[in-house]
Amino acid sequence: MSDKKNIDVSFVMTVYNKEYYLPSVLKALLGQVGLENPEFIFIDDLSTDKSVDIIKKFTRNVPNVILAENKDNRGISPRINQGIALAHGKYVRMLDSDDIFPIDSTRKMLDLAEEINADMVYGCFVKTGKEPQFLENETMGDFSYTYWENALDGVLHGRFTRMGQLIKTEVLKKAKGADERVFIQDESIPIRAAIYAHGIVKMDADVVLVPKEIGNFSGNKLQLDNDRFLAYCYCLQDNPQLPDFARRLMYKRAVSAYWKFVRKSKLLPWFSKAFVIYLINKIHSQLPNMKYLRKMQDDFLKLPNVRRVVHPLFSLEK
């Protein structure tokens, strides 16, 4: 049995009805090269297909495997946090159960984190359009990278979404993982972690390979606008101590998400207050108008046909 104190990376995978993808995803995940003592944490969100059986089959006799079979369906963000809470590794690398990792990607991300002393390492993702079985043994080529000593500055001046990240576990736990008030975690994890992180690296390389998509939330643009807005809205409300540059840029992103929603939903959106405020912030970002922020928040929270998490927060406290 491996020593839980010496795990280099904990992989946290949320699972919900992905039996088609899982054989290939697991082959690439379990085949990650160059790792000394990895941990594999699978959090099932009450799948109704054969996802759990496939995980059990592929991880039989694999050390350091944790499989949580939950009795209720809560959504992506709380299940990610459940996995983070169970992690023993120095770093956590998260993935959806339809994401495929190049087999050398984790080792290269770890090397970069240690070499530069960065708490967060992000790469890119690519939608390949390929069947998952053709991506099981892919490797990375040469790559360049950009480093920001101020992680929050880096996150707010770049695009750090999807599950292309490796983050120091202590940072993730201090940040309390994903914001569970937001259904999709893509925006909330990087901004929350960056508040507590020292240094972030963005690799100019595809560390996540997305196979041919059968269906996911990326097709629901309203959900994406809603979750993107709320990630920044809640972060602003929860962290009034953040420096002005961060609050300005978070507010700018929140206003932008709201304008996208208004543009799709109103007959003459260019005559709206939303457009004026969007234009002002695009030209020169403003400090948050908290009254207007709450107004935008109320509009989003009234939307039908948007998935939400409505339950007590899952604690990352030990």
Image (spheres, grey):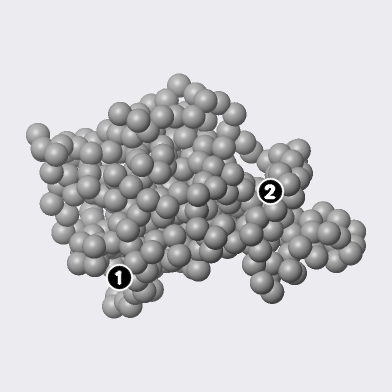
State the image quarter where residue 116 is shown.
bottom left
Where is mark 2, residue-wise? 290
Q: Residue at x 58, y 62 (%)?
A: 249
Q: Earlier in the sequence, mark 1 or mark 2?
A: 1
Q: Could you give the CA–CA distance between mark 1 and mark 2, rounded to whole angstroms?
A: 44 Å
Q: Is residue 136 visible?
A: no
Residue 205: x %, y % from top left:
37, 71
Secondary structure beneath disc 2? helix
- Tell me the kind of residue under disc 1: Met
> Quarter of the image containing the N terminus?
top left
- Kindly identify which numbered label has been placed on residue 45: none
Lateral position of residue 106 relative to residue 223, left or right: left
Q: Nearer the viewer, residue 57 or 38?
A: 38
Q: Nearer the viewer, residue 227 or 207?
A: 227
Q: Quadrant of residue 83?
A: top left
Dot 1 alpha-carbon crowd within 10 angstroms: few under 14, some 14 to 19, many 20 or more: some
Residue 11, placed above or below residue 276: above
The image shows residue 285 at horizontal and vertical percentages of 64, 67
Where the C terminus falls, by quadrant?
top left
Q: Secondary structure at mark 1?
A: loop
Q: Identify the residue at image location x=37%, y=33%.
A: 316
Residue under the point 74% across and 59% down: 259
Q: Which mark is residue 140?
A: 1
Three-letter residue code for mark 2: Met
Q: Give above or below for 180 relative to 116.
A: above
